[in-house]
Amino acid sequence: MTIDVSNPRDEVYNFLDVMANHEPFTNHMMREWEYSGPDRGIGSKARVKVSAGGRTDTIDIEVISADPPATIVERNIGAGGRRIATGTYTLEDLPSGGTRIVFEYAWQQAPLSERLTSPLVRAYLRRANERAMQRLAEQLAARQGAAAS
């Protein structure tokens, strides 16, 4: 998923670096956020509930790598430890002064049921993540507008 925003890269990075800032743009798919660890950076954690396809799962998210102001990597563990994935945000400066945000979700391992239905699971995740990126862009625009006021 890729989206361009007018906010400078440092501002986007600083927003994404705070785990609690992820809740408002992902709460259409992730609910009941509980936070632990530091507020930002490596070791920042959240436990969330996800409901999809009539199933509910608890997912543990932890920032495992960060390279300011370019990348943030989160590890996600769900399905009772049988699903391990990473979500990586890569931020690039745009010639216009804004930022290109690239989000990549990649499974390291997944339960057999998810592997067998991977085209459906991936389609659901693609739509949900596209919506999250749109909501992220809206929130960043609102923050930029509020700062300009």
Image (cartoon, helix red, strand yellow):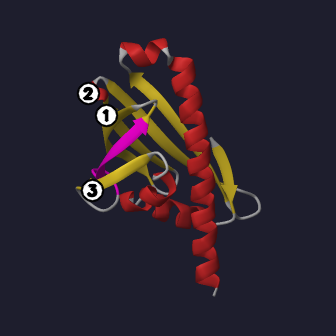
Q: Nearer the viewer, residue 54 or 94?
A: 54
State the residue position of label 3: 35
Q: CA distance from mark 3 to mark 1?
A: 15 Å
Rendering coords of residue 116 (x, y %): 47, 12
Q: Which residues are magenta?
A: 41-51
Q: Nearer the viewer, residue 48 or 14?
A: 48
- Check residue 132 in the rendering and tell me which mark sits there, or answer none: none
Q: Nearer the viewer, residue 29 or 71?
A: 29
Residue type indicated by callout 1: Ile
Image: 105 above or below 74: above
Residue type indicated by callout 3: Tyr
Other residues around mark 1 within 10 Å, as few (<14) / some (14–19) / many (≥20): many
Q: Is residue 7 rendered magenta in the image? A: no
Q: CA distance from mark 1 to mark 2?
A: 6 Å
Q: Tell me which residue sits at (69%, 65%) in the image.
A: 6
Residue type indicated by callout 2: Gly
Q: Tell me which residue sits at (43%, 62%) in the image.
A: 21
State which quarter of the image contains the N terminus. top right
> What secondary structure is marked by label 1?
strand
Q: Tell me which residue sits at (34%, 26%) in the image.
A: 83
Q: Is residue 46 rendered magenta in the image? A: yes
Rendering coords of residue 62 (x, y %): 31, 45
User: Image quadrant of residue 59?
Assistant: top left
Image: 29 above or below 77: below
- Check residue 81 in the rendering and tell me which mark sits there, or answer none: 2
Whether tag 1 and tag 2 are in contact, CB under 8 A, the answer is: yes
> What secondary structure is marked by label 3?
strand
* Residue found at the very far front of the displayed protein: 54
